[in-house]
Image (tube, rainbow, N blue to C red):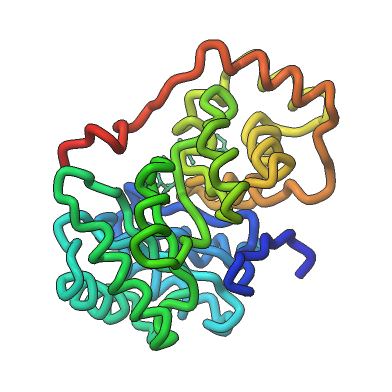
Amino acid sequence: SDQPTILFHDGNSIPQVGLGVWQTPNDTAVTAVKAALDAGYRHIDTAAIYENEAGVGEGIRASGIARSEIFLTTKLWNSDQGYDATLKAFDASLKRLGTDYVDLYLIHWPAPKRDQYVDSWKAFIQLQKEGRARSIGVSNFYPEHLQRLIDETGITPVINQIELHPDFPQKEARAYHDKHRIVTQSWSPLGQGTLLENPVVAKVAAKHGRTPAQAITRWHIDNGLVVIPKSVTPSRIVENFKVFDFKLDDEDMATFASLEKDGKRIGPDPMTATF
Ligand code: NAD
């Protein structure tokens, strides 16, 4: 297919748009994943803590699309951090997904108070050597956490999945990532829906004859970000993927930039999160 992909420093590539399945129960995950794959998506983002890996696996099999055509991500939960616990949690994820590898395994949060992310990362390096995690990365890491992985293991994550939307563009993190060839992936790319009624977004969407969700998804693409909008509604899943036949221009980017002044996190700050 002609959807854009982003190259990792390990030589693998990730489709730039994927389906997020947070807060999606197993039965709904089956139909959402199948709807996405039918619509042309080839990238699904789940996590052990979402408790829907079984549904995601079932949706993939129900699609009839070869596993090798699909980019599948899951994540290690905080309470499973540590070298041995990580290996065990990974096996359990594969079992629930019903697959013998994932395309991308992420440390879900740095959980700095636990101070186990370096040991977890060493297990990730082992899993990649075994070919069972094709690529390895992290989520919610600050530059100082990334730097510690690099300094203590010599292996740089291929990606960091962080909260990022037009009113919270994470410029400092992105500058660090770019310097280290780490791809930036946006979670809650639509601001969990909060940006969809925004007049600034509506202005850009109207100019291109698109919906607000499409304009925002395109903003991520045109910023070189990997983006995983979530929906369980088939018509919206289709809508969010119809974004490869238009492009934002400098004027649109400037319009979007006016949102930055009221920007703030929706989710927890990874430095102080207590889970
Ligand atoms: P999002 O920004 O993708 O917003 C999703 C919500 O927007 C939907 O629930 C729906 O209400 C609305 N929506 C989506 N498409 C729409 C459309 N076309 N028209 C109207 N409304 C629409 O929010 P999210 O789910 O928080 O983030 C996306 C994904 O990011 C998650 O599903 C998950 O995979 C990932 N994520 C990761 C972390 C992490 O810690 N790594 C944290 C949060 C989310």
Which is more toward the observer, 227 or 174?
174
Which quarter of the rendered picture does the C terminus lie within?
Answer: top left
Residue occupying image coordinates x 58% and y 17%: 260
The percent position of residue 113, horizontal first and vertical second, equals: 16, 43
Is 47 placed above or below 86 here?
Answer: above
Q: Residue furthest front?
A: 151
In the displayed structure, 64 sits above or below 20; it is below
From the viewer's perspective, is residue 81 above or below residue 176?
Answer: below
Q: Residue 213, image x and y in percent?
A: 62, 35
Instruction: Name the foreground residue: 186 vs 41.
Output: 186
Taking the image as shown, residue 274 lies to the left or right of residue 250, namely left
Q: Where residue 63 appears, x then y in whole percent?
A: 53, 75
Position of the N terminus, as image quadrant, is bottom right
Between residues 93 and 175, which one lies in front from this camera angle? Answer: 175
Q: Residue at x 59, y 38 (%)?
A: 175
What residue is drawn where x is 83% and y is 48%?
245
Left or right: 5 as drawn, with respect to 166: right
Relative height, residue 144 to residue 85 (above, below): above
Query: In the image, what residue occupies the spot 63% across and 69% down?
Result: 13
| Quarter holding residue 216 | top right
Q: Position of residue 72 (x, y in %)?
A: 48, 69
